[in-house]
Amino acid sequence: MSEHAGKPPVVIVKDQTKITSGAEVQDKLISAARIFSDLLKPTFGPRGLDKMLYKTDGSTAITNDGAKIIAELMVKHPAAKMMVSMGNSQEEACGDGVTSTLLLCGALLQEASTLLRKGLHPLTLVDGYHTALAAAGEQMDADTLGVSDERLLAVAETALRGKGAEAALDHFSPIIVEALTTLAANRDDAGAEHVAMFKTGTGGLRDSRLVHGVIVNRRVLMDSLPNRLSDVKVAVLGGDLKIRSMTRDAEIQITSADQLDSFVDAEQARKDALAEAVMTSGAQVVLCAGEVDRDILHRLADEDILTVGELDASEIRNAADAVGANIVDSILDIEAADLGACGSMLWERREATDQVEDIIRIEECANPRVVTIEVGGGGETATEEIIRGLHDALRATSLALASGELLPGGGSIHARMAHAVRRASESEPGRARLAMDAYARALETIPATLVENSGGDALDRVLELRAAAREDDGFVGITPDGSVGTADGVWHPRAVIEEGLEAATETAMSMLRIDQVISARGD
């Protein structure tokens, strides 16, 4: 009888654990990633269509923004989660190019699937992809151009195409460029986060405008407060405009009427001191984050000083940056150097309800570090999508302004990189050459998708682009109607193309290195 007979087997993992190995692993990962990228394919480019997202809470959103779509999806598959992580990284780094990054990753994995079935080793694919990425980078170095006023405007237009704001493309793109150039003149880190958005809820898209200042929704406490002020000095407080409350409870015993009068007089004297500090400072407008004492408010109103209270932290910060003021905690500590200035201050009274607040406009600031785009148009869902498109365009344009490096769009740079990779593969003696050729075909997914979404024949147009790249006929890409033409008016920041390509390649190589999937859930 065997020495180990009758002994139970060694159990390392739970019975429901499922281990998948071999070629089946690659097939499952590649299939999941391909399905995920195909989901976004119809949304790509200026002729891309929208997706309607119906959320678990019953609300809906309509968008073709890749970052928004993947943020709302509740994915379960590990490969799909890798794709989501890649898209989030691209969005955080560049604010644009999420859809193209996901399409490239799906195309790289689809090309890899074909070669894996033919017997090519996964690590050979990885080596070939790595070499191809280097060749594509060299082509980007050769095609990179500097920023000009015309190209910067084209960057904004390119980012807005295919979004809801495209209906007023010629109106919004100058606004975006003016907003960022204004900020760049007043701060070193000008970006989309320094451009606030305000929805008017009325008018049309072409009623939108750039405000050199900020607009806030807040209830104006008194009708008698001054309005329509010009060339005023502004004080910004980070706290309350009232007597500080005691941190502990205290009881005061008053035994005579004189003591009561003295107590009331002392309290009033402290309020008068706060009001006098405002008036002495020279401020004609006071914005504060906390509460405003009613007695102080009436005293300031008598002196034609507009006082607005209970602003949140972001509104206080934006207002201070717009008018050039320093945020002080107490009005007693304010100095003349802490005051800011604006050319126009006005407020509009709205109907008194729990939801509707008055509109306070702080405009015509001389050197604003924060500006506002006032977006016209009715409809909450449509306006939100327009603001999302404007934000993406601001991110892309600020990136171009900061880096000073641009690459042609419309699939032009991808076609030229594909040609560079094919040319580099000719000097590759081993099987990695097959992977490099596959990489080149994957790059052509971008122009092919642009053609498909425009209703054209993708194969014919891609072949035309190959010929143009081979003959080096300049920057030739796919036009909005799906034909092949010059791409001079379509530009992207280099970082959007470069980081998207690197992220797609690295994610694809990471998936190709996986040879076993261990699922504790058994699926």
Image (spheres, rainbow, N blue to C red):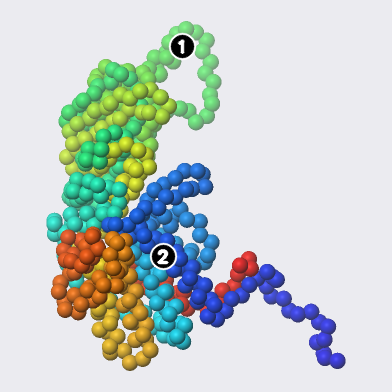
Secondary structure beneath disc 1?
A: helix
Give how far across and how far down residue 350 sits, in percent.
Answer: 33, 25
Which residue is disc 2 drawn over?
A: 37
Name the amino acid, label 2: Ser
Which residue corresponds to the image point at 34% horizontal and 43% vertical from the top-left? 382
Q: Quadrant of the C terminus?
A: bottom right
Q: Is residue 265 above or below residue 77?
A: above
Which residue corresponds to the image point at 43% horizontal and 80% vertical from the top-left? 114
User: How many other residues sit within 10 Å of disc 2, few (<14), some (14-19) or many (≥20)?
Assistant: many
Q: Give the number of the disc on residue 346.
A: none
Q: Is residue 462 above or below residue 65?
A: below
Q: Quadrant of the N terminus?
A: bottom right
Give how far across and how far down residue 168 sits, in percent.
Answer: 22, 46
Give how far across and how far down residue 480 sits, in percent.
Answer: 23, 59
| Left or right of 135 on screen, residue 170 | left
Name the amino acid, label 1: Leu
- 243, 347: nearer the viewer: 347
- 134, 183: nearer the viewer: 134
Rendering quarter of residue 294: top left
Which residue is disc 1 drawn over?
A: 260
Give how far across and how far down residue 98 sits, in percent.
Answer: 36, 61
Distance of mark 1 from mark 2, alpha carbons?
76 Å
Of the two numbered discs 1 and 2 in the rendering, the one whose residue sits closer to the viewer:
2
Secondary structure beneath disc 2?
A: helix
User: How many other residues sit within 10 Å of disc 1, few (<14), some (14-19) or many (≥20)?
Assistant: few
